[in-house]
Image: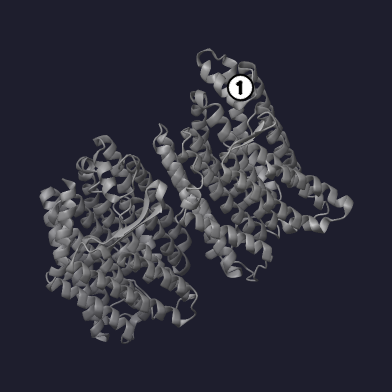
Amino acid sequence: MLTALLILFPLLAGLLVFFVKGNAARNLALGSSIIEFGIALGAFMLFKHNPNAALLNFDHAWVQSLGIHFSVGIDGMALLMILLTTFLVPLIILSSFKNEYSNSNNFYGLILLMQMALVGVFTANDGFLFYVFWELALIPIYFICLLWGGENRGQITFKFFVYTLLGSLFMLVGLIYLYNHTNVDGLKSWNVQDLYAAGRSLTEVQQSAVFWMIFIAFAIKMPIFPFHTWQPDTYVTAPTQGTMLLSGIMLKMGTFGVIKWLLPVVPLGLEKWGGTAIALSVVGIVYASIIAISQKDFKRLIAYSSIAHVGLISAGILSANQQGVQGAIMQMLAHGVNVVGLFFIADILLRHTGTREMDKLGGIRGMNGNFAVLFLIILLGSVALPLTNGFVGEFLLINGVYQYSAVMAAIAGLTVILGAVYMLRAYQKIMLGERNDSNVAFGSLAGTDKLVLGIICVAVVAFGVYPKPLNDIAEVAVRDILMNLK
Amino acid sequence: MKGLLIISGLGILAMLAEIFKFKKLLFPMVLLGIVAAYAFNFMEWKTGMSIPYFDNMIGFDKLGLAFSGIILATAFFWFILANDYFEEDTNLVDHFALVLFALVGALMLTSFKNMTTLFLGVEIMSIPLYVLAASKKNDIKSNEAGFKYLIMGSFASGFLLFGIALIYGATGSFDLMQIRAFISENAATLPLFFYVGVVFMLIAMLFKVSAAPFHFWAPDVYQGSPTLITALMSTVVKTAAFAAFMRLFMVGFAEVSSTWTGILAGAVALSLVIANFSAAMQSNVKRMLAYSSISHAAFMLMVILANVRSNLSVNALIYYSLAYSLGSIAAFGVLYNVTKKGNENIDAFNGLAKRNPSLALCMAVAMLSLAGIPITSGFFAKYFVFTAMIGTQYKWLLIVAVLTSAVGVYYYLKVVIAMYFKKQETEEPIQIERSNILVIVLTTAATIAIGVVPGIVAEMFKF
């Protein structure tokens, strides 16, 4: 019931926001997203108390004759993803307070609809429902990028939409293929457990086909090399809040999908092709890191760093061991928070100086010390310094990949060094050194800006120092998933 | 049957309207008549019995009545939309009568039991359309459309008739069930010309549903005809043609499926590729929708190809027809209003989101539905087709379908981008008639409604 509420509430709030004018829209959106976070915390408490609470699950027949159910539920991994989503959305909304968007009610309405779809993706226990939410998440973000994006947005969002949709359609065919092999007392079923069973009953060749059909959708969404070409342009062109949604949460749909809808479904396919997929992920890490180093635009640099990070996450998941998958989940949480912070910093830079080009910036630390500190903390989280939130995940991830293959782990480990290189270089260029003409007066930050950055910094440090509550949930969740694998 | 009689009566009445001077009354009478026909149709469907008429020339079973229902509902919306098309023209009553007779033909096609009824249905439906396609008398393109449609349509009818004759020669019957029985009894000794007959009929039907490689008339005819007639052709006519196609091949020729499935699979693959890539290259929206309708025809043909007369495939085809008709009526309704000034290019849609936000929203939903994005009905339609296909040997067609669907998204989105992203010189709002708004909003709402609760439709048609 609670889970259904988590999906229904942003939907209703979002629809309401469409009809509200002016600043009331954004306040309403902010308020409802905070309430949503409250509901998510409630779910968290309930889960701590009793992970099998009936309140966390909801099942209602949707199309009875086809075995389609509106079946949603919260398990450990879903809970973490929901916490991430509901934690980030208020911040994302708050971060927009200094931007002037035309027709802002539509903007905020779409963000809330997006939240609805994201929560749906993370909680769906029915293959068909999962697909529907998966696609639904695409529509609001497409319009956010199309209507409020930057230069060339028409073409770029187009590529993004068609690319991701193509992947999704392959996944749909894969899922229908699985569905066609389910058999529950002579009937077909979309239930996730039945799909698992159906997948495992297939031969190796069939599993391999299904593996690629489904993996392509996730690989495009994350994105993984060589399916990443839509990503940098889209991230750069989208309005800041759109980029935050894309990188902070939507990217996790892909990694989440691999953990829940791929690993347990086709173990033989994974055994046969997992190595290839890991190799692609690892290539992506190095490739994206090297490109990131040569970027001039800070936002584009973050976009490439995101490809590098997600490559490592994907490699960890596909290595299919406790450390790898658990690290992936921890890193998904950390990356979500950090990348939102970084994109927000890029937005602040643009607002204050009119540029994001790092060569044109410099010496900002001297003008605004607070900003420099906040930026540094988020940056350290992103390069996974110990005692920041990025460290736990990255450590576990490399450990997990190492268990799979030492060579892969060695190459993947380059991300630690390369990441530090491009991030610290960026910091040096932007914050240190000589002042440039374009940023003569980098004034103090607005209240909402400080609040957003402050909250993110607290999260970075708090979960770096004390990751235990999240880590415990992740550990149990991963153990359950891996048990399924055997 | 009563529905068919009512519509025929309306057609005759329409011709008398000029003489007896009740032109003004005609429009409400037609709407009322269609509602009545729908009501009778629904009641017959409820009782669920298959009633044969005229020595089993025509018989109304649940399947036929379901298609009739879709056709009547679409026609109802169409008439409201076409309200002022009839007003501004001088030959008002002729046009009413022509559309109504085309409708009679369409209803016959859904329920034929005999090859002669099939042929009659095809002709009764097509001949008025030849005239209607050319009904913009001063427009050279409209004349071309009518002429081309006539020539190509006659050509197809020739094939149809020849096919029927050959099959009669082999089996000694026009009756669909008798032919079927004959085939299963004499499977081994059927003469070669029987198979030729089947292939001829297949070609004729592919012509009628405008599937590649027999599609080349469609873009010109669709583009040249008045927009509303195009809307009629791509909804009512298409649904009827598919109902006939399904009955003919899934009932009549099911036993000799190996003769025609191979050709059909090729036609489907060709249609998907040609239609989607051609549509992507169009800048004229009407022409683009013509190609899009070819691609949708290919999807519906896939269901027939799956060739299992199960609930699943019958449902799939009915649902697809309904979803496609609703989406098309909405899309053509918007197109009709946006292109009133004569510019049918995609830039006519530029800035529509500013000039009339609700119209733009409806068009966006219609486009997303035709592209097959959840939660619109177009998505479920695609889903049902995929599900029907995945158990067959034609899995490769699914891959073709997926790849070309992505191309499809490209051209549907082009319209959305034009509406929301491109700028128009004038920002003057577009005024449209209330009745048109009503139709567009209703069909759009229905598109979403049966997408959210597909069960309403899917569970209604259990056979």
Q: Viewed as shown, does residue A160 lie left or right of A339? A: right
Above/below status of A77 relative to A377: above
What colour scheme governs how the chains and residues are painted in the rendered image of this protein? Answer: one colour
Residue shown at 58%/43% (left/top)? B47
Amino acid of disc 1: Gly
Above/below status of A458 relative to B22: below
Answer few, some or many: residues within 10 Å of disc 1's Cα (few below 14, many 20 plus, some between 14 and 19): many
Across the whole image, how many numbered discs are drawn on residues? 1
At mark 1, the secondary structure is helix
Where does the image place residue B171, in percent across and percent down from the top left?
61, 18
Where does the image place residue A378, in percent across and percent down from the top left?
22, 73
Q: In the image as oriented, which residue stretches furthest toward the top? A: B189
Q: Quadrant location of residue A173?
A: top left
Q: Viewed as shown, does residue B437 lie left or right of B389? A: right
Residue corresponding to mark 1: B197
Q: Can residue B215 be seen from the camera position used here?
A: no
Residue shown at 26%/82% (left/top)? A371
Residue shown at 52%/26% (left/top)? B260
The N terminus of chain B - image quarter: top right
Label 1: chain letter: B
Residue shown at 23%/62% (left/top)? A332
Where does the image place residue A9, in percent across and percent down from the top left?
38, 70
Where does the image place residue B130, in percent across and percent down from the top left?
74, 40
Q: Give B443 or B157, whichever is nearer the viewer.
A: B443
Above/below status of B11 relative to A372: above
Q: Can residue B109 be seen from the camera position used here?
A: yes
Q: Quadrant location of residue B194?
A: top right
Q: Viewed as shown, does residue A299 lie left or right of B368? A: left
